[in-house]
Amino acid sequence: MKFLDQAKIFVKSGNGGAGSVSFRREKYVAFGGPNGGDGGKGGDVWVEATRDLNTLIDYRYQQHFKADTGVHGMGRDRTGAAGEDVTLKVPVGTQVIDADTDEVLVDLTEEDQRVLLAKGGNGGWGNARFKSSTNQAPRKANPGEEGEERWVWLRLKLLADAGLVGLPNAGKSTFLSTVTAASPKTADYPFTTLHPHLGVVNLGAAERFVLADLPGLIEGASEGAGLGHRFLGHVERCAAVLHLVDASADDPAENYRIIRNELVEYDGGIEDKPEIIVLTKCDSLDEDLLSEVSESVEAVCGQTPLLISSVANQGLKPVLFAVYEHVKKRRQKEDAKREEKRIAQAVKDGEMEEQKGWSP
């Protein structure tokens, strides 16, 4: 299945049904009266997050979503049926952005999170609503209220625990295919990876995390060069950034500086995330040259880079455990936040009393 991480769609809620103008016509009833019913409410448009999906490919082939119109009111005080709602299923991690204002309408980060995108119009009143002591035979009814419509962008940001960044051909896809069961395309030319890939790293029974391989960046990516920096949005939710640098390149230190500058220019908070520097393809260098390259990179980044060879399966475990330490810290913080929210909700619902400090 093709990976698609953004799509532009049109949503429109249903119009409300019109009210009815009707009068009673019954045999042996001397005086009739208005009995026109109200129109039904128009259908709503909802967006709901689910873990059953991992791409927005469903919205490539259908871009218009319209809820049903409410049924008109009828005589004998019959109210029209409400229009059927439309629910858009999207992967967890999807942002809904207004296409006109670029405002983020909602960020769906939890499973089963459900948000209203367009509210259906209310149904119009029938003439029975306008009956009064001074107007016993009203001949007017309200039309249904119009629904809402808007163009929105759906943008998926993968909920990976760690993200791989680096220049094209830095060995990211080879690393991912070695440490996970993922099978991204690998070749000896740049830009082999055209869309993100996910893999699950299994370090033990309870020590697992998701690793995302992103298309390679080049200098000027923040200005649209190469594949641009659009895919960096998938790293915004990661606990750590795994920066891979080709040790066999002409100037590895300069390559690190280029990518680091692009992360800063992206201005999405990625530059503040924990960064693990890794020199790849180290099996192709002798010890003296490798030591020289490592020192030059350390002088630029301020930390000692880890040395690996994905092909020779060397030095991979220390890198994975270093990443997992950051992942574990974030998970502990998230668990603490969820527990606080659970306790606050329990206190609000009266299921438990608020814990106060001890006093004599």
Image (spheres, grey):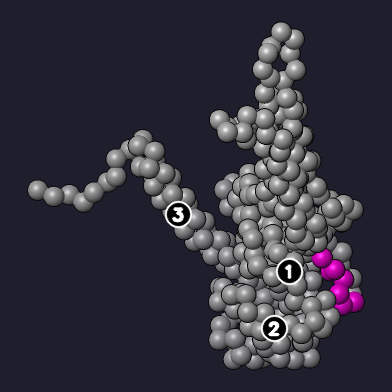
Mark 1 burial class by Cα count in 10 Å: few <14, some 14-19, many 20+: few
Amino acid under label 1? Asp
- Say which quarter of the image contains residue 350: top left
Residue at 87% x, 71% y: name it.
192
> How many marks on residues?
3
Residue to which mark 2 is pinned: 262
Amino acid under label 3? Lys
Q: Main secondary structure of the magenta part?
A: loop
Q: CA distance from mark 2 to mark 1?
A: 27 Å
The part of the chain drawn in magenta is 189-195
In the image, residue 301 sits, relative to residue 189, either above or below, namely below
SS state under label 1:
loop
Asked if labels 1 and 2 touch by Cβ distance under 8 angstroms, the answer is: no
Asked if labels 3 and 1 touch by Cβ distance under 8 angstroms, the answer is: no
Q: CA distance from mark 1 to mark 3?
A: 34 Å
Q: Position of residue 211 (x, y in %)?
A: 68, 61
